[in-house]
Image (cartoon, grey):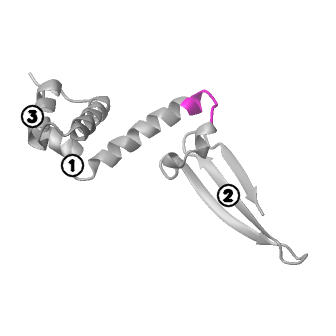
């Protein structure tokens, strides 16, 4: 009896698929069939998980899971990693021109989607 796959199954299937493609020993069709046997789903289901832009969606879900776990612990060091930009935090940039000689100050604010934590960065 087939069971409903979880997002974790989908991420694992994507990782296995990418590993097999990198090896270059099997055709994509054969890889889909092998993964279908592992996850007890149809081959076309595996193809839907991987093809059609969905691989980016599941990669983003993995990033969200990781960031959420770190956010819960109060660790926002992942803000410096550009992979998370737009996925789990929002970046806003603006600049100011000072009256004293027109010095430009750039401000960049990153806001966490989960808890609202903000980090402000300045550059001159």
What residue sits right under mark 3 in the picture?
Answer: 33
Q: Is residue 72 magenta?
A: yes
Seen at 9% across and 37% down, the residue is 30
Seen at 62% across and 44% down, the residue is 116
Instruction: Give the label on residue 108, or none.
Output: 2
In the picture, the quarter occupied by the C terminus is: bottom right
Percent x, y of residue 82: 53, 49
Q: Which residues are magenta?
A: 70-76
Q: Is residue 108 magenta?
A: no
Q: Secondary structure at mark 3?
A: helix
Q: Secondary structure at mark 1?
A: loop
Percent x, y of residue 38: 16, 25
Mark 3 near mark 2, Cβ–Cβ under 8 Å? Answer: no
**Is 15 on the left or on the right of 29, as rendered?**
right
Which tag is nearer the camera, tag 3 or tag 2? 3
Instruction: Give the label on residue 51, or none.
Output: 1
Instruction: Give the label on residue 21, or none.
Output: none
Q: Secondary structure at mark 2?
A: strand
Seen at 9% across and 41% down, the residue is 29
Going from N to C along the chain, the mark reached first, 1 or 2, is: 1
Percent x, y of residue 88: 51, 45
Mark 1 near mark 3, Cβ–Cβ under 8 Å? Answer: no
Q: Residues within 10 Å of mark 1 (few under 14, many from 20)?
A: few
Q: Residue furthest right?
A: 100
Q: Mark 3 and mark 2: span between their CA atoms? A: 47 Å
Q: Residue furthest top?
A: 1
Q: Is residue 119 above or below residue 105?
A: above
**Is 103 on the left or on the right of 4, as rendered?**
right
Q: Quadrant of residue 41?
A: top left
């Amino acid at each position: 009896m087939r069971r409903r796959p979880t997002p974790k199954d989908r991420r694992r299937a994507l990782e296995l698929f990418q590993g097999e493609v990198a090896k270059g020993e099997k055709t994509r069709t054969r890889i889909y069939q092998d993964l279908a046997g592992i996850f007890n789903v149809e081959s076309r289901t595996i193809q839907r998980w991987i093809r059609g832009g969905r691989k980016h969606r599941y990669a983003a879900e993995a990033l969200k899971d990781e960031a959420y776990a770190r956010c819960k612990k109060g660790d926002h060091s992942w803000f410096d990693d550009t992979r998370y930009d737009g996925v789990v935090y929002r970046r806003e940039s603006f600049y100011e021109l000072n009256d004293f000689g027109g010095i430009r100050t750039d401000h960049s604010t990153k806001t966490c989607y989960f808890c609202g934590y903000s980090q402000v960065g300045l550059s001159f």
